[in-house]
Amino acid sequence: MVSSVHDNAPVGLPGTIRALGWTSFLTDLSSEAIYPLLPAFVKSLGGTSVEIGLIDGVANAVAAVVRLPSGAISDTVGRRPLVLFGYGLSAIIRPLMGLVASPVGVILVRMADRFGKGIRSAPRDALVSDLVEPAGRGRAFGHIRAMDHAGAALGPLVAMLFLLAFPGRERLLFLLALLPGLVTLAVIWKTVHDAPTRTAVAARTALAPQLSRPQSLLLGSVGVWSLGAASEQFLLMRAAELGVPAALVPLVWLAMSLAKSGSALAAGRLADAWHPRLALGAGWLVFAAAYAGLAASSHLWAALPLMALVGVAYGLAEPAERSLVARLAPEGRQGGAFGWYTLVQGLMALPAGLLAGWLWQQGPAGPAKAFAATAILAMAACGFLLVTVRESEPRSPRI
């Protein structure tokens, strides 16, 4: 599976882009061997559905605090130092999940892990913008997202096989997550470098919150969408409620991740062929349709394909989002632009998790209400994006 994703990467991508793809693969292999097991793990520690919602909500909100300054600082000092530090922090912290004794401990470890992600995310995406011409950015982001999701697909499979061989040894599995993290650091150290012609920005200018009207409108639409895009842990919970055995829940995550990986490769090319705004709108529409179907269905045979469709929607939207952020950013300030983008996503994760967790607890119809709210917010975000976000000098789409 790994070689398939790599071999299908677009021809002509810089070596650093391919290396970033492998760092994403290894990091998600490590992270997603743990992530699908967290709902059951938290419940075994006495946690509630609200606390499960808080795992990602609080963690991503804390990470969001560093995303804007990290991206802006990378416009001044370069991308590589922050990318290396962010990946390194997560690699060291993540295995500590094997030592926690309470739901609060799970939340704290997840917070520290996502703090590292917050440090590296905007500089990494800005580095892609530095290294790739605008006409090929969709393919570059699509390649990285495809590798990311391929790692996310393999992680749960590794977890399932490990637990079949060593039942009840989740904590040991969490501790072993250190190994791919260390390989990630070696890849970055050896192969990831800043663009030699990057335009540096003065520190005072980089940290100044200057956004154009199209950038602000894009952030508004991303915020509305993010409010509905609560933790995918709720999809895993729903799969378990509808009859998927606990030992097979990681396979649901595997299917979603494969759908994300495959669609991200195609969607990157789509974002380059169309305007990325149109490709993003299409991804959000698919997302809304999938969640509307989940709200209307209480049968496992219908829910599982719809969960895979959620994965397709993420794969469609992610390369287009990043291409559009880079397209609207002023020259030399891509780090700050991606910082704003990831900041909005991170800050909305907490209310999104709380909203979904609260709706989930509203009786037998709670899951349907939570999924319906997601569908409505995704539709609203799509409409706002397509109606309001315009460039000052729009380009004709290439088909």
Image (spheres, rainbow, N blue to C red):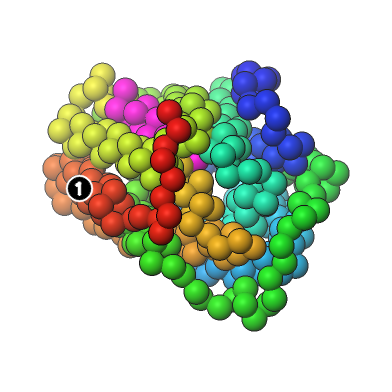
12 and 300: which is toward the camera: 12
Question: Image quadrant for the N terminus?
Answer: top right
- Residue lying furthest bottom in this view? 204
| Circle 1 residue | 376
Q: Position of residue 315 (x, y in %)?
A: 45, 34
62 and 273: which is toward the camera: 273
Question: Image quadrant for the C terminus?
Answer: top left
Residue at 71% of width from left, 62% of height from top?
Answer: 199
Q: Is residue 179 visible?
A: no
Q: Position of residue 126 (x, y in %)?
A: 62, 54
Residue at 57% of width from left, 34% of height from top?
Answer: 139
Lateral position of residue 195 relative to residue 310, left or right: right
Q: Is residue 17 visible?
A: yes
Q: Amino acid at mark 1?
A: Ile
Corner quadrant of residue 346: bottom left
For residue 297, above or below residue 140:
above
Lateral position of residue 189 relative to residue 332, left or right: right
User: Please, what is the dominant secondary structure of the magenta stretch?
Assistant: helix
Magenta stretch encompasses residue 8: no
